[in-house]
Image (cartoon, grey):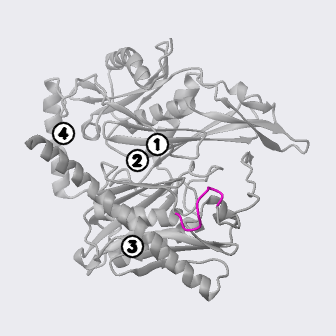
């Protein structure tokens, strides 16, 4: 009954011999990123991230009572995660509700964040993490993980450190940072990575497509470089509300 | 049910709000017929053909409108199709759970649907591409982001704004019967400005735009949609019971408030 009216045409060339990409970036540049915490009133912690064309809201509820009760873990917190795409987040309307992809992404995001959370501090409770993709433009799981980590910190959950995620990829012979929509659709390899930044451990790594050992190593090194930049933005986003308070307090004194 | 503490806290709150209401006061200091401030967030948030991120006090909603092409319903071959869907996201409230829309979500979606049908706001005949075969499908997806009461009005206002902002991609019909986007757009023909007003009744007093606490403490709730000519376009008694005089009084308040809200949304013409 429905007929999509959005035609996608692959670009003629994904990257020029000089390394210029379809959005004008160089191979090792990130897309523009903006992060804000505390955007929602009801949630215990929240974050809003704009990453290229992605728009993502993450919210955390907890630690709170577990429902249904039988899921309660006596010695640590239960951590649940739901990654969900809005019907209006894609060119063609996405049918609401979970599909196989979003179920898998919910799992890998939870497992990317779990090593960072001191779950044994909150026995018998649940920490619920919600990642809502309101506009998707390649790399939603990584931007979502980055946002969720901010929401956890905003909720005051005890953590070893922030989790920072981004994708790298291969387009022809180039290893590129933060693949865009064209590269995600028509590029060769996509490698989402998340790091627990405190000790630079990898908590998410997926890959589809062939990479040589050299390319693989180059991709991981590039991801680490990108993560350092994103990590600084996360810390700045967490600090910002306090700076506003500081300025207003200072303003009153003078 | 919640714990003993929660139950007694709720009944204390109810007592307090009743006490205030009987003196003509509200907990947040608003007048009985005063809405919370409406803010419209600017930016690009979705891939919809129209969208609006709106807050009503601490309640926040995001509405995206997607347009597709499909077949009309057999009984209305010369009309486009409007579909509404509400998602009460678990991010919006500790009491919302993931899953398919529950009865509250469905009621809200249908209320908004009736607001636009009852006011004949959308010129559906202009959404026909090939009579009986191809029409535009307009899909309104309403997202509750933050629930501090009166989601219905917030969702309806945001939907109205999103629909008014919607640009429909024009298509050309190919020989094989399929369609190709032409690259041109036309504004969705929205001819009316139906605005939703919800009232709670606490201790016999009517209050416009109830907060979450007021909704919880309310003896009765109702929602009505009024158009630019002051006509009632849809009505829903939700919980409890109202005297006919109370409903009439609420309608006159809604009619009086209509220009104020329309202006706030930037939809007051002339």
Q: Residue at x 74, y 58 (%)?
A: A10
Q: Which residue is mark 4?
A: B14
Residue B224 occupies quadrant: top left
Apparent side of residue A233 relative to residue B121 in the rendered image (left or right): left
Q: Position of residue B92 (x, y in %)?
A: 37, 50
Q: Which residues are magenta?
A: A21-29
Say if the magenta span includes residue B101.
no
The disc placed on residue A182 is none
Same chain check for tags 1 and 2: yes
Pointer 2 local density, CA inside 10 Å: few below 14, some 14–19, many at least 20:
many
Q: Which image quarter: residue A121?
A: bottom left
List the residue tagged with mark 2.
B145
Secondary structure category for the residue under label 1 = strand
Query: From what the image shows, is residue A56 above or below residue A232?
Result: above
Mark 1 and mark 2 residues within 8 Å of each other at the beta carbon: yes
Q: Compared to A223, does A232 lie above or below? A: above
Question: Considering the numbered disc 3 on the image, is that residue within a helix, a strand or a loop?
Answer: helix
Residue at screen point 59% across, 78% down: A207
- Front position in the image: B14 or B78: B78
Tag 1 residue:
B62
């Amino acid at each position: 009954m429905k007929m999509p009216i959005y035609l996608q045409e692959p670009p003629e060339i994904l990257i020029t011999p000089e390394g210029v990409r379809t959005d004008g970036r160089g191979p090792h540049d990130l897309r523009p990123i903006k992060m804000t915490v505390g955007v929602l009133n009801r949630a215990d912690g929240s974050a809003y991230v704009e990453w290229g064309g992605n728009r993502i809201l993450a919210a955390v509820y907890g630690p709170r009572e577990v429902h249904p009760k039988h899921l309660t873990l006596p010695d640590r917190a239960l951590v649940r995660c739901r990654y969900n795409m809005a019907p209006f987040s894609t060119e063609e309307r996405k049918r609401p509700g979970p599909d196989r992809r979003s179920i898998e992404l919910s799992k890998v995001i939870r497992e990317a964040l779990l090593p960072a959370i001191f779950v044994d501090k909150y026995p018998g409770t649940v920490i619920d993490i919600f990642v809502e993709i309101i506009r998707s433009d390649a790399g939603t799981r990584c931007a979502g993980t980055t946002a969720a980590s901010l929401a956890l910190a905003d909720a005051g959950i005890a953590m070893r450190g922030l989790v920072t995620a981004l994708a790298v990829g291969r387009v022809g012979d180039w290893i590129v940072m933060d693949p865009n929509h064209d590269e995600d659709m028509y590029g060769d390899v996509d490698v989402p990575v998340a790091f627990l930044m405190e000790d630079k451990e990898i908590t998410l790594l997926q890959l589809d497509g062939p990479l040589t050992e050299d390319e693989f190593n180059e991709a991981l090194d590039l991801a680490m470089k990108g993560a350092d930049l994103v990590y600084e933005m996360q810390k700045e986003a967490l600090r910002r509300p306090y700076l506003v308070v500081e300025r207003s307090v200072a303003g009153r004194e003078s | 049910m919640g714990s003993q503490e929660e139950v007694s806290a709720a009944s204390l709150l109810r007592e307090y709000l009743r006490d205030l209401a009987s003196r003509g006061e509200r907990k947040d200091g608003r007048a009985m017929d005063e809405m919370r401030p409406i803010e419209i967030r600017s930016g690009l948030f979705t891939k919809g053909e129209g969208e609006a991120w709106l807050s009503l006090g601490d309640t926040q909603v995001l509405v995206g409108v997607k347009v597709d092409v499909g077949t009309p319903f057999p009984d209305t071959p010369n009309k486009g199709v409007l579909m509404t869907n509400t998602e009460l996201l678990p991010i919006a409230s500790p009491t919302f759970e993931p899953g398919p829309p529950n009865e509250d979500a469905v009621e809200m979606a249908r209320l908004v649907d009736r607001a636009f049908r009852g006011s004949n706001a959308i010129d559906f005949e202009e959404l026909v591409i090939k009579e009986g075969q191809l029409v535009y499908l307009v899909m309104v997806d309403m997202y509750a982001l933050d629930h501090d009461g009166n989601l219905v009005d917030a969702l309806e206002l945001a939907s109205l704004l999103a629909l008014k902002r919607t640009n429909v991609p024009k298509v050309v019909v190919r020989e094989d019967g399929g369609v190709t986007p032409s690259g041109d757009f036309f504004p969705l023909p929205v001819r009316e400005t139906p605005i939703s007003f919800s009232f709670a009744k606490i201790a016999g007093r009517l209050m416009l735009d109830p907060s979450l606490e007021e909704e919880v403490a309310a003896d009765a709730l109702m929602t009505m949609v009024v158009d630019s000519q002051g006509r009632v376009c849809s009505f829903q008694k939700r919980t409890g019971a109202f005297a006919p005089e109370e409903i009439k009084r609420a309608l006159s308040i809604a009619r009086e408030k209509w220009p104020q809200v329309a202006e706030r949304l930037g939809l007051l013409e002339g």
